[in-house]
Image: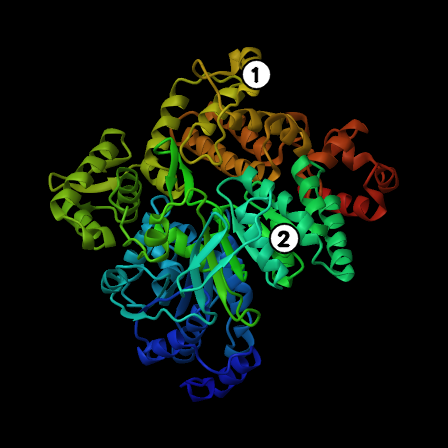
């Protein structure tokens, strides 16, 4: 089916053709036949790179040409949301529309009022629904990307709750679900009220196999060997592909392993580079060194890149990860090693994907456990670059010769999606959310809502009622919810409303409230940091190593008077937060604690948010005497500073390092900054005339 034959405007056809679209892929053609251009709801279950983004774009074009409602595009990750926003923004001129993106709770919904297409993370959509955002009722098209993630134990319930509420809007929106290939896609489609469009076609043919002791057996009947070296089988497989003119993506089970594997590959890969490629990658390496503190991990990465090799994991900051992704897409980096997070992240295909191990550490069991078939298939989805490769390969490394790996993973079917919305944690979070959004809701109405979820579709009414009653009992006992009459009508208390609006687990909110109840109005910095770092929402969490014990003991001994309750042990994350607020640099945090800048960024985000939650709970529980200290704590975590710099960082353009330099030059507050001349300010190291003028201008805005 050609683009020119679609029932869309000529302008839209010309635009799509200008973007390189001429003929529809089979899953796209099937979607059109299923009525996506006629407002029909569909669930597309197809492999990665089979053209699901164009299906979403066609649905948008068709809907907005016929209606004045809004389109929401739900994404599981911020990076993916940004990627899609850049793609859909191209539609603005041809459709005369405005696109918007919102991915964080701190962002207001007002700026979205004029947008026709809104790209959001699932959590952000949930937050806007909870807040009763008016334009939600105007939604006419819902596009849910990676909808199979409903089966994710942690984030799945939020996506499920969002879809359950959106599909029941009075506007009866069209639903377009985009999913990986899963076993029970028919059940998911039936629950969503969608026609199932299932197609296993890929633009690049994929073969899968297992490598045992240097011999590879593929599922298309071919067998071949590899030249085995001291680098190990995973790298030998990756290098073989690079030598043949392709790119390789090697999945490692841990961060240290990804770094180690990349280091082993650099000598062999570097021999395949041209002088021009080496020169370009050397410039990229210098760019990374110039933009980051030279920690061991940054220096190692910078040394690898000119060799055509890199590693990618969450310990790297977003700037480094973006540069690596761009260079891999460009083809400069030939072999990339990565932790599994990349499989669920941005689109980064390679000719050959190597899975170095099918084992992952699972904290629930305290040991390594085999990955699911669904996760393995997600890895496979990265194999084969459209327009570059004629084929894609995914190969499991089997060092011990388990014949079952081929049967289980290569020949296996992905596990059916299971709902986790009725888990204990999910029920208390989302029951409070529904009660808060629907004051006066009855027990039966609350039960009926959960029966309309995917969990309700799959599960037992008796079990759901029992589990829901237990969750509501907890909310009642902890005064997050109150009953309004003998008919069991529920309404959230002020404490419950605030907990729901802050997107906080009610159990965490109760722990915060109880801790604040007995807190004295004195400095409890360490006590509050411990409370924050032990919360389930705090991430990432690093356990203490043996070599950290002395530093941990000293911190606890030196700050006993700051504790809310006796602290017998602390985590490495608590140490990192305290050191960060004490103005330790990225280099110092890396050397002393093994905490990298990407980790510290996420700890800063979650830590400052939880400090904000503490402050707001203090506000509504009559602990106004604690608000000042908690407000200071939030700002210190956010900026990574000691108390004396709080006033200076209010000025845009003054961060932690610049504020400390100003302080050392006697500029300790806004009054001092006001008095100093632009000329004197410019003489301070790393400021200069342009920045000095900008700082003075921004300072005046703060003082208004």
Here the colouring is rainbow
Q: CA distance from mark 2 to mark 1?
A: 37 Å
Q: Earlier in the sequence, mark 2 or mark 1?
A: 2
Residue 619 visible in rendering: yes
In the displayed structure, does residue 523 sit left or right of residue 192? Answer: right
Q: Position of residue 360 (x, y in %)?
A: 42, 40
Q: Which residue is mark 2?
A: 324
Residue 673: name its quadrant: top right
Q: How many marks?
A: 2
Considering only vertical position in the picture, is 329 above or below 593?
A: below
Looking at this view, is 169 or 249 the one in front? 249
Neighbour class for label 1 at 10 Å: few (<14), some, many (≥20)? Answer: some
Secondary element type, mark 2: helix
In the displayed structure, does residue 700 sit left or right of residue 183? Answer: right
Secondary element type, mark 1: helix
In the displayed structure, does residue 563 sit left or right of residue 153? Answer: right
Q: Which residue is mark 1?
A: 555
Q: Quadrant of the N terminus?
A: bottom left
Q: Position of residue 571 (x, y in %)?
A: 49, 24
């Amino acid at each position: 089916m050609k683009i020119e034959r679609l029932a869309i405007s000529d302008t839209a056809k010309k635009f799509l053709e200008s973007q390189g679209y001429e003929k529809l892929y089979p899953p796209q053609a099937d979607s059109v036949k299923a009525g996506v251009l006629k407002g029909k709801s569909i669930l597309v279950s197809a492999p990665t790179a089979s053209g699901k983004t164009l299906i979403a774009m066609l649905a948008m074009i068709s809907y907005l040409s016929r209606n004045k409602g809004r389109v929401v595009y739900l994404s599981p990750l911020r990076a993916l949301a940004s990627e899609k926003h850049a793609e859909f923004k191209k539609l603005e001129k041809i459709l005369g529309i405005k696109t918007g993106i919102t991915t964080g709770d701190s962002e207001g919904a007002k700026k979205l009022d004029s947008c026709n297409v809104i790209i959001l993370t699932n959590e952000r959509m949930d937050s806007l629904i909870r807040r009763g955002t008016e334009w939600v009722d105007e939604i006419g098209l819902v596009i849910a990307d990676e909808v199979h993630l409903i089966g994710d134990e942690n984030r799945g319930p939020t996506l499920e709750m969002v879809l359950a509420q959106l599909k029941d809007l009075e506007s009866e929106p069209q639903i377009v679900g985009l999913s990986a290939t899963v076993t029970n896609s028919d059940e998911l489609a039936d629950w969503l009220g969608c026609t199932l469009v299932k197609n296993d076609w890929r633009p690049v043919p994929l073969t899968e196999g297992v490598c045992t002791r240097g011999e590879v057996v593929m599922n298309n009947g071919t067998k071949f060997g590899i030249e085995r070296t001291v680098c190990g089988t995973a790298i030998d497989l990756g290098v073989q592909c690079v030598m043949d003119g392709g790119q390789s993506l090697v999945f490692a089970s841990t961060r240290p392993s990804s770094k180690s594997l990349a280091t082993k590959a650099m000598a062999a890969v570097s021999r395949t580079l041209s002088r021009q490629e080496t020169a370009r990658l050397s410039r990229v390496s210098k760019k990374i060194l110039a933009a980051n503190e030279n920690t061991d991990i940054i220096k190692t990465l910078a040394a690898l890149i000119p060799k055509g090799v890199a590693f990618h994991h969450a310990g790297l900051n977003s700037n480094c990860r973006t540069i690596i992704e761009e260079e891999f897409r460009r083809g400069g980096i030939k072999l990339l090693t990565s932790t599994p997070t990349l499989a669920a992240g941005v689109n980064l295909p390679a000719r050959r994907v190597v899975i170095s191990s099918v084992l992952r550490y699972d904290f629930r069991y305290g040991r390594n456990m085999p990955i699911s078939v669904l996760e393995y298939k997600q890895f496979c989805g990265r194999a084969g670059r459209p327009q570059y490769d004629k084929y894609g390969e995914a190969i499991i490394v089997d060092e011990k010769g388990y014949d079952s790996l081929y049967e289980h993973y290569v020949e296996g079917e992905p596990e059916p999606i299971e709902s986790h919305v009725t888990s204990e944690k999910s029920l208390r979070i989302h029951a409070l959310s529904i009660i808060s959004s629907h004051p006066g809701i009855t027990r039966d109405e609350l039960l009926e809502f959960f029966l309309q979820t995917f969990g309700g579709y799959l599960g037992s009414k008796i079990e759901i009622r029992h589990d829901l009653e237990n969750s509501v009992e907890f909310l009642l006992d902890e005064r997050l919810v109150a009953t309004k009459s003998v008919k069991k009508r529920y309404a959230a208390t002020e404490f419950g409303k605030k907990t729901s609006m802050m997107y906080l687990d009610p159990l965490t909110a109760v722990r915060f409230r109880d801790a604040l109840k007995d807190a004295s109005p004195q400095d409890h910095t360490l006590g509050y940091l411990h409370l924050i770092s032990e919360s389930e929402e705090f991430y990432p969490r690093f356990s203490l190593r043996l070599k950290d014990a002395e530093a941990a003991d000293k911190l606890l001994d030196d700050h006993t008077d700051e504790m809310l309750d006796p602290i017998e042990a602390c985590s490495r994350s608590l140490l990192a937060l305290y050191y960060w607020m004490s103005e330790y640099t990225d280099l110092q945090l890396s050397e002393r604690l093994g905490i990298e800048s990407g980790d510290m960024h996420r700890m800063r985000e979650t830590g400052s948010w939880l400090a904000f939650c503490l402050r707001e709970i203090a506000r509504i529980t009559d602990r106004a005497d604690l608000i000042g200290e908690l407000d200071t704590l939030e700002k210190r975590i956010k900026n990574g500073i000691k108390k004396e710099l709080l006033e200076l960082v209010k000025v845009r353009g003054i961060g932690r390092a610049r504020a400390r330099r100003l302080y050392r030059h006697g500029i300790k507050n806004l009054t001092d900054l006001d008095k100093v001349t632009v000329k004197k300010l410019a003489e301070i190291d790393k400021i200069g005339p342009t920045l000095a003028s900008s700082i003075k201008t921004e300072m005046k805005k703060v003082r208004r």
